[in-house]
């Protein structure tokens, strides 16, 4: 709701206990929530294609839309696709191991920690950051002697 009201900062991702504790799984869960918030903020495009006016006329009030090409083409991009949330029926969920959200989040966090390769900073950026830090240290009397 705050994002819909114009707030542009989400504070506390990954934090537990009022920020005393940080948890990688919580960070992954919170990131997923932030992704969903960003999707909501994109809004709902309203035009002839998204409204499927022609298809509605074709199918009528007693038809179905599930098997139509338009539905297939659009439903995945409009429905939230989460790596963490499991929307399967309970029996199917149990068949696949029955892992809860926290277990899946820890697995994803470990995967990220083991495989992520950050993009290197562009040339000159580390030096510029060092320059900014040194200026601040000098300005506030924090320069190490």
Image: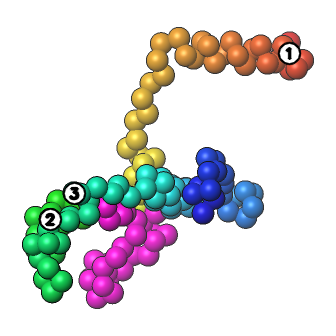
Q: Is residue 109 visible?
A: no
Asked if disc 1 and disc 2 are in contact, CB closer than 8 Å, the reply is no
Please tell me whether residue 90 is drawn above or below residue 136 in the rendered image. below
In terms of secondary structure, where does tag 1 sit? helix
- Mark in front: 1 vs 3: 3
- Mark in front: 3 vs 2: 2
On the image, the x and y values in percent for residue 69 come to 10, 64
Q: Nearer the viewer, residue 79 or 81?
A: 79
Q: Earlier in the sequence, mark 1 or mark 3?
A: 3
Task: Say left or right for 118 vs 145.
Answer: left
Residue 84 colored in magenta in the image = yes
Q: Residues within 10 Å of mark 3 (few under 14, many from 20)?
A: few
Q: Nearer the viewer, residue 79 or 50?
A: 50
To which residue does mark 1 refer?
Answer: 139
Q: Earlier in the sequence, mark 1 or mark 2?
A: 2
Residue range in magenta is 76-105
Q: How many marks?
A: 3
In terms of secondary structure, where does tag 2 sit? helix
Picture quarter with the N terminus = bottom right
- Mark in front: 1 vs 2: 2
To which residue does mark 2 refer?
Answer: 54
**Image point 50% across, 58% down: which residue?**
37
Q: Is residue 137 visible?
A: yes
In terms of secondary structure, where does tag 3 sit? helix
**Image point 14% across, 79% down: which residue?**
60
On the image, the x and y values in percent for residue 127 come to 60, 12
Q: Residues within 10 Å of mark 1 (few under 14, many from 20)?
A: few
For residue 49, which numbered disc appears in the image? 3
Q: Give residue 128's quadrant in the image.
A: top right
Spatial CA span between label 3 and label 2: 8 Å
Task: Say left or right for 58 vs 80.
Answer: left
């Amino acid at each position: 709701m705050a994002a819909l009201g114009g707030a542009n900062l989400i504070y506390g991702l990954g934090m537990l206990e009022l920020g005393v504790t940080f948890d990688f799984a919580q960070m992954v869960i919170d990131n997923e929530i932030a992704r969903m918030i960003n999707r909501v903020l994109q809004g709902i495009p309203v035009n002839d294609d998204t409204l499927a006016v022609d298809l509605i006329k074709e199918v009528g009030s007693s038809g179905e839309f599930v098997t139509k090409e338009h539905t297939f083409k659009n439903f995945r991009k409009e429905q939230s696709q989460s790596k963490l949330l499991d929307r399967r029926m309970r029996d199917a969920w149990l068949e696949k191991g029955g892992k809860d959200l926290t277990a899946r989040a820890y697995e994803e966090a470990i995967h990220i920690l083991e495989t992520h390769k950050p993009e290197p900073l562009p040339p000159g950026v580390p030096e510029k950051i060092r320059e900014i830090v040194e200026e601040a240290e000098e300005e506030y009397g924090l320069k190490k002697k």
